[in-house]
Amino acid sequence: MKTSDSIFLRALNKESLEIPPIWYMRQAGRYMPEYRAVRKKFRNFLDMCKNPEVCCELALQPINAFNLDASILFSDILTIPDAFGLGVEFLEGEGPVFKNPIKTPKDISSLPEFNSDDLSYVYEAVSNIKRALPKNIPLIGFCGSPWTLAAYSIEGRSSKDFNYTKDFINQNNDSAHLFLEKLTNACFLYLKQQVQAGADVIQIFDSWANLLNADQYEAYSMGYVKKLIALLKEDEQTSNAPIILFARDPSFNTNKMAESNADCLSLFWNIDKIDKSFLQGKVALQGNLNPKVLLEDNDLIEAELNKVLDMFSKYPGYIFNLGHGITPDINPDKIKFLTELIRSK
Ligand code: CP3
């Protein structure tokens, strides 16, 4: 079998399929005992991401456990801020913490030039995973959106409201745009090297799209996602890689996301209406079961799954996924149950 026979690539090409391809955001992670066994050997999560053999092992875990239709690189979106010298650490129970966050406009103007070769450990992980995967299972490379990376880099840690970041961009608007520009170029070079190393598909995670109202979204996020996608589509080496765009709980209509020129939109779990006549033929769709449903009993899971399939199963180019990542409290048996249930319908 060739990679082009993959049902995931066929769906990204907007084909109608009898059974949708299935993969899960955060399919490798703490909810799996085999992940926890590897994770406990590393104090800092990013040290684990810097080990290409371990990343390969972790990316393969969910493929082996659940027989999924796509694999995703094991890494993190915060590798880029780390390569800019912002000193990213993941501390026990705290999530990401930056040693040198962006505090002033000068921190932005004096950032070192992004050297994409600093992230060679990621490209090595990509080529290891690609070599280990069955030929018909495509590999998804990824990055955070420029806006999402800027929000973490300015806030210096995760936050509910990112108020410090919001103040910073209001008070230092030109610098904020300069930073977003630098991040956009870094994302392009980074994704290009992931594709050169073997990534078949690209996903852009705009995990903090929800912080912005519709106008701000256009100015600080969508504008740069559009630029990033244009750079990828114009480059000979990346122009053939389909691009998936995920945005968390956007305050704007889904149709707006299609303006990005992404090939596929990954829908957050609270989206229960879509404008099929507008989207059909323009973009493939991915999503969007609420991950929390997987904490319920099997009957409820099936009822909620049916709602999602009723909405999407006839859509040309539909990929089954959750509306956000698998959380650590989900029992892996539920992932197995759900995956088999979709294929049995
Ligand atoms: O299978 C996969 O999808 C794994 C690859 C992957 C990880 N992070 C591994 C990870 C991917 C695609 C990401 C993307 C990522 N990282 C996003 C976008 C996706 C989303 O959820 O919106 C974001 C926002 C991050 C930043 C990040 N990484 C945070 C906020 C945290 C801490 C939260 C947490 O769950 O602990 C991480 C850590 C992280 N990234 C873990 C994994 C498996 C858990 C770390 C651990 O084992 O301690």
Image (cartoon, rainbow, N blue to C red):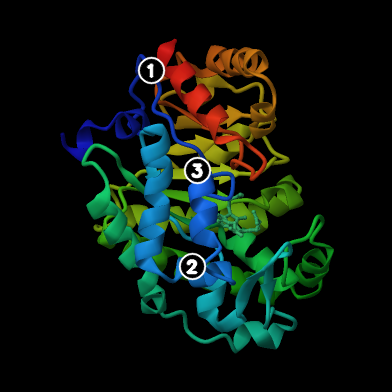
Quadrant of the picture in which ligand 1 is shown = bottom right
Residue marked by disc 2? 48
66 up-or-down from 340: above or below: below
Q: CA distance from mark 1 to mark 3?
A: 20 Å
Amino acid type of the residue that numbered disc 2 sits on in the rendered structure: Met
Estimate how packed mark 3 is, as few (under 14), some (14 to 19) or many (20 or more) residues with alpha carbons within 10 Å: many
**Residue 193 located left or right of residue 86:** left
Q: Is mark 2 within 8 Å of ligand 1?
A: yes
Q: Tell me where residue 170 appears, x and y as whole percent.
A: 80, 68
Q: CA distance from mark 3 to mark 2?
A: 17 Å
Q: CA distance from mark 1 to mark 2?
A: 35 Å
Q: Tell me where residue 17 appears, x and y as whole percent.
A: 35, 18
Q: Is mark 3 within 8 Å of ligand 1?
A: yes
Q: Is label 1 in a helix, a strand or a loop?
A: loop
- Tags 3 and 2 touching, CB below 8 Å: no
Residue marked by disc 1? 19
Estimate how packed mark 2 is, as few (under 14), some (14 to 19) or many (20 or more) residues with alpha carbons within 10 Å: some
Q: Tell me where residue 323 appears, x and y as whole percent.
A: 60, 34
Q: Residue at x 70, y 40 (%)?
A: 249
| Disc marking residue 27 | 3
176 up-or-down from 85: above or below: above
Query: Which quadrant holds the N terminus?
Result: top left
Q: Is label 2 in a helix, a strand or a loop?
A: helix
Q: Residue at x 59, y 14 (%)?
A: 302
Q: Nearer the viewer, residue 22 or 248?
A: 22
Amino acid type of the residue that numbered disc 3 sits on in the rendered structure: Gln
